[in-house]
Amino acid sequence: MRIKDSNKHAIIIVAGILIVVILVFLDLRGNKGTDYGNLTQEEISVALEKEIDEMEINTVASLNERDRIEYYVSKFVEAIEEKDYEKAYDMLYEDFKENYFPTLSSFEEYAKSKFSKVLSLDHTNFERNGDYYILWITMSDPLSGKNSGKDINFVVRENALNDFDLSFSVI
């Protein structure tokens, strides 16, 4: 994904989170003062996931309003790029899913046909309307070599830090 100026913050945050996760994992494996031998792999995974969630919430809390919303949309787009359609599907508003994608497979078919494998996001406008944020984006495939930009709007509702759902203009 080609990085636009407005996405640099989100990329830096994600990179920082990954570094911290690796360091925490290495610390858990190498920490001789704590007895992790009695924990199952699942318990260690749950503990790591909880720490990652807390670190991500702290990171998101440090962002301004627009950067948070752009970060949420980038998480959705990254899930599609990684072909984790279930994760992306879970980020959608329930009513939006019912109206446009009643099943995960219908969403997956749509995502495969409408979104390229590598997406570049150009954030063109941002507005807030009550509890909803509207983000206008031009999505393009930088590898296609042609003008493949698609204008798409995302509507994001932030329930709490790092707890959001969204919808988008169906293209």
Image: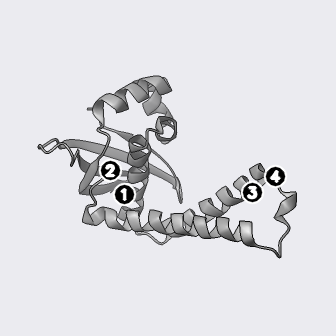
Q: Tell me the crowding category of disc 3: few under 14, some 14 to 19, or many 20 or more residues within 10 angstroms, Cα based.
A: some
Q: Is there a contact, CB below 8 Å, between mark 1 and mark 4?
A: no
Q: Tell me the crowding category of disc 4: few under 14, some 14 to 19, or many 20 or more residues within 10 angstroms, Cα based.
A: few
Q: Residue furthest left?
A: 146
Amino acid under disc 1: Glu
Amino acid under disc 2: Ile
Identify which residue, 27 or 129, lies in the foreground.
27
**Residue 24 position within the rendered picture, expressed as x and y whole percent measured from the top left:** 65, 68
Residue at label 2? 134
Find the distance from the CA under tag 3 to the CA under tag 1.
31 Å
User: Which residue is at 59% across, 65% downward?
Assistant: 22
Secondary element under disc 2, as helix, strand or loop, is strand
Amino acid under disc 3: Ile
Q: Is there a contact, CB below 8 Å, between mark 4 and mark 3?
A: yes
Q: Toward which corner of the image does residue 113 lie, by quadrant?
A: top left
User: Which residue is at 35% across, 28% downward?
Assistant: 110
First in sequence, mark 1 or 4: give its number.
4
Residue at label 1? 70
First in sequence, mark 1 or 2: give its number.
1
Amino acid under disc 4: Thr
Secondary element under disc 4, as helix, strand or loop, is loop
Residue at label 4? 40
Q: Tell me the crowding category of disc 1: few under 14, some 14 to 19, or many 20 or more residues within 10 angstroms, Cα based.
A: many
Q: Is there a contact, CB below 8 Å, between mark 1 and mark 2?
A: no
Residue at label 3? 44
Q: Is there a contact, CB below 8 Å, between mark 3 and mark 1?
A: no
**Does residue 55 appear left or right of residue 82 in this picture?**
right
